[in-house]
Amino acid sequence: MWLDSLWVATCPGCDAPGPPGLCRVCQDDQRLREAAYEGMNVWALAPYPGPTAKVLVRAKYAGDRGLMDLLGRSLAAAARALPGRWDAVVPVPSPWTRRFTRGFAPAAVLAARVAPALGAPLRHALRLAPGKKQASLDAAGRQRNLVGRLRSVRPVRGRVLLVDDAVTTGTTARSCARELLGERTDAVDVLTLVSTGWGDAADRS
């Protein structure tokens, strides 16, 4: 339709006019690297803060599943270069209240793209009861906030790749790993879209 010519697409990361999707500048923000979190193997696609993190915030707080899926495709494409094989991909859970208001669970959307890219089954093995948001708390507060709320609901055999949308203190990822590790799960690695520790491990090597 002629009305389509009046619509100017913009980059969801920086609002620069151009074709649909992330612009070249924002795409350059994405480069899978090992992140520095003691005691965990963590890979992150982009730094937090940054253009990709800005897209993530828009997707989450505007309830834009399509935008979250766009991020999932980027993460899945990068995940193919990961050094290893996994027996299952498990998303970090969101409380049902947040899934209801937002319309989706961010990590689940990402993991749904990552799992087939790695040829591994997707397993929703964790549940998180409603409670205070982790983002509003420090590391110690985040740890306390998860007590009694986070639990494993199904065992997962072998090596697991835990997928999250953002890793900042690493508290949630560690708590999820502890819940997963048991008689069947041998090891848990972490893949996240954005991270405050992005590049630190590689930069120090």
Image (spheres, rainbow, N blue to C red):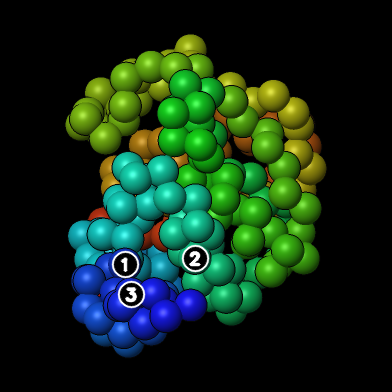
The amino acid marked with disc number 2 is Leu
**Residue 60, quarter of the rendered image:** top left
Q: Residue at horizontal 32%, vertical 60%?
A: 55
The amino acid marked with disc number 1 is Pro
Alpha-carbon neighbours of circle 3 within 10 Å: few (<14), some, or many (≥20)? few
Foreground of the two, 101 or 96: 101
Q: Can residue 200 be seen by looking at this rendering?
A: no
Circle 3: element type? loop
Image location (x, y in percent) of residue 172 = 41, 36
Q: Residue at horizontal 44%, vertical 35%?
A: 102
On the image, numbered disc 1 is attached to which residue? Answer: 12
On the image, numbered disc 2 is attached to which residue? Answer: 70
Q: CA distance from mark 1 to mark 2?
A: 10 Å
Q: CA distance from mark 2 to mark 3?
A: 20 Å
Who comes first in sequence, dot 1 or dot 2? 1
On the image, numbered disc 3 is attached to which residue? Answer: 7
Foreground of the two, 119 or 34: 119
